[in-house]
Image (spheres, helix red, strand yellow):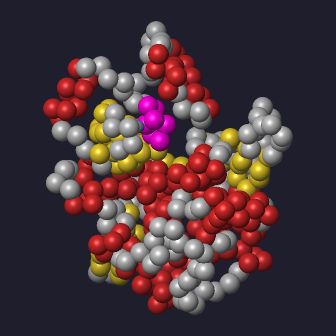
């Protein structure tokens, strides 16, 4: 799409770590969990749009705030917060004077700081350097859409946002979502939804004005989000959930709600390796947002000596690796901007 970006109203933005769209998107089956997680993000590391440069790690949050954000009753919110704590996704502590405080677990929070992770792609097993990044997400995703949309519509919207929002936020213009070519497989990769649930979710999100879909014969379907509409959705759909949402949808993968501690905790957390090496990044070799497995320093050094293709970290050299470029235009733009920046400071690239 070549249409000039339309200036849109600025939105309160939460920096959502990449892992939200990989591991968490499929593991948060309960809407309340997403809302509670979003609130902690919002109050701790997520205030990019408000000029905060220094992250606040811990924020005091009352049970009632969780309940209000998720629009559920306080007992259920408390139960889900406990489950998130037990799963190691958020941390909880008691501070004199402040009461209960919450933080995003460091192994997730570090992904919002754009650190480079050294490791092995869990999909294609290539070893290298992976950049981590965050996706800007309007607050309304957590405060309005999460309680207002069905699970399928919500997950579908998150997938569209994952692509449509990446690199689409600037202090000057706010969030200007880009059109993205997406396929059913893109939705399947990031969610536990079946193809049929994906199309139902897309229809609902489209009808609610949360996303925009462009279909033309013989061309790939294009998607973008419409965050300017997100704030008004809640006004007509406000509701209070008393019961845990027992979904009638067939559950292909997990027929039961996630059991807090052992079930949700990923084996990677128990591994011997340093958790510092584990994260999520984009692999340019297999084009997956991938969980990165730890590798030893020797393995990494050996690999570098062998000149194996190094994902993301360095601008790829011209030549055969070109074919493995991701389809996303964002990466090409990033690359172009990066080279420009390098040239501006006198590098010959
Ligand atoms: Zn890979």
Residue at left offset 38%, top offset 63%: 104
* Residue 142 figure quarter: bottom right
Q: How many marks?
A: 0
Q: Residue furthest right?
A: 217
Q: Magenta span has 283?
A: yes
Residue placed most toward the observer, 200 or 154 = 200
* Vertical position of residue 237 compared to residue 215: above or below: below
Question: Does residue 239 appear left or right of residue 17 in this picture?
Answer: right
Q: Position of residue 96 (x, y in %)?
A: 29, 81
Quadrant containing the N terminus is top right
Residue 158 visible in the shown view: yes
Q: Could you tell me residue 224's position as x and y percent?
A: 71, 48
Is 214 or 78 nearer to us in this picture?
214
The image quadrant that residue 193 belongs to is bottom right
Would residue 64 be found to the left or right of residue 227 on screen?
Answer: left
Residue 241 pos. (x, y %): 60, 86
Q: Is residue 345 visible?
A: no
Q: Residue at x 66, y 44 (%)?
A: 182
Query: Which of 187 and 57 lies nearest the eye of the viewer?
Result: 187
Quadrant position of ligand 1: top left
Above or below residue 195? Residue 6 is above
Residue lying at 36% horizontally and 27% vertically, measured from the top left? 310
Residue 75 colored magenta?
Answer: no
Q: Residue at x 77, y 53 (%)?
A: 212
Boundaries of the magenta span: 282-288
| Relative height, residue 205 to residue 221 (above, below) | below
Residue 6 appears at what percent x and percent y? 78, 42
């Amino acid at each position: 799409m070549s249409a000039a970006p339309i200036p849109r109203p600025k939105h309160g933005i939460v920096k959502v770590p990449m892992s939200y769209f990989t591991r968490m998107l499929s593991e948060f089956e309960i809407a309340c969990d997403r809302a509670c997680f979003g609130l902690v993000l919002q109050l701790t590391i997520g205030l990019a749009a408000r000029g905060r440069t220094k992250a606040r790690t811990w924020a005091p949050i009352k049970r009632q705030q969780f309940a209000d954000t998720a629009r559920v009753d306080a007992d259920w919110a408390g139960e889900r917060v406990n489950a998130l704590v037990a799963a190691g996704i958020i941390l909880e502590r008691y501070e004199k004077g402040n009461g209960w405080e919450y933080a995003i677990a460091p192994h997730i929070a570090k992904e919002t700081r754009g650190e480079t992770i050294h490791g092995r792609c869990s999909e294609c097993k290539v070893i290298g350097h992976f950049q981590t990044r965050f996706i800007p997400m309007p607050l309304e995703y957590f405060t309005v859409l999460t309680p207002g949309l069905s699970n399928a519509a919500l997950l579908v919207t998150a997938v569209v946002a994952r692509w449509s929002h990446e690199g689409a936020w600037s202090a000057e213009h706010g969030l200007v979502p880009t059109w993205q070519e997406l396929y059913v497989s893109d939705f399947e990769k990031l969610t536990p939804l079946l193809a049929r649930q994906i199309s139902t979710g897309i229809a609902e999100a489209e009808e609610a004005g949360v996303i925009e879909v462009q279909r033309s014969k013989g061309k790939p379907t294009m998607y973008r989000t419409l965050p300017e509409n997100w704030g008004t959705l809640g006004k007509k759909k406000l509701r209070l959930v008393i019961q845990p949402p027992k979904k009638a949808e067939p559950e292909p993968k997990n027929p039961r709600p996630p059991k807090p501690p052992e079930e949700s905790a990923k084996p990677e957390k128990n591994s011997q390796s340093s958790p510092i090496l584990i994260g999520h990044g984009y692999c340019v070799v297999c084009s997956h947002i991938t969980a990165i497995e730890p590798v030893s320093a020797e393995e990494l050094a050996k690999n570098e000596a062998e000149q194996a293709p190094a994902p993301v970290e360095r601008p790829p050299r011209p030549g055969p690796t070109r074919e493995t470029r991701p389809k996303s235009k964002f990466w090409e733009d990033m690359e172009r901007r990066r080279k420009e920046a390098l040239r501006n400071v006198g590098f010959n690239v």
